[in-house]
Amino acid sequence: MKFNRSVYQALTMIGQFGINMLVPVFICSFLGMFLDKKFGTNFWVVVLFFVGAIAGAYNVFRFAKQIFQRESEQSAYLHQSRRNRRDKSEREDRPNKQNSV
């Protein structure tokens, strides 16, 4: 069975969203566990977990914004070229008014 290229792009994007969210959470959580063991405290895991969650959410937001901007630029480019082709074909179809007078 042959899949569309857009299916693979969508799956890749989903994976990137997950990685962008989970990596900061895990790094900050492990750093918090290390600091808790080193200093004998119990709160660094919680604090750094939330810092990682906020950082991950910000990464996902930036990634989604970048994708949206890229798609809107591509869409604008495609619509512009379609409009240019349509205008050109309309100019070729209708006779020149100066020549008909």
Image (cartoon, rainbow, N blue to C red):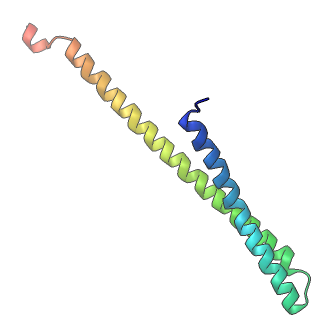
Query: In the rendered view, would you say 48 is above or below 69?
Result: below
Q: Which picture quadrant has residue 36? A: bottom right
**Where does residue 85 sit, x and y in percent of width and height?**
30, 25
Query: In the rendered view, would you say 23 is above or below 88?
Result: below
Q: Quick check: 34 left or right of 84?
A: right
User: Is residue 57 in view?
Assistant: no
User: Is residue 4 in view?
Assistant: yes
| Residue at 66% across, 60% down | 20
| Residue at 58% across, 30% down | 2
Q: Quick check: 89 left or right of 39?
A: left
| Residue at 39% across, 38% down | 77
User: Which one is in front, 98 or 45?
Assistant: 45
User: Which one is in front, 78 or 100?
Assistant: 78
Query: In the rendered view, would you say 81 is above or below 30?
Result: above
Quarter of the image containing the N terminus? Answer: top right
User: Which one is in front, 99 or 13?
Assistant: 13
**Where does residue 10 sit, x and y in percent of width and height?**
61, 42
Q: Which picture quadrant has residue 83? A: top left
**Where does residue 95 sit, x and y in percent of width and height?**
16, 11
Query: In the rendered view, would you say 10 is above or below 79?
Result: below
| Residue at 55% across, 49% down | 67
Q: Residue furthest front?
A: 1
Q: Residue furthest bottom?
A: 39
User: Which one is in front, 89 or 95?
Assistant: 89
Q: Quick check: 25 left or right of 95?
A: right
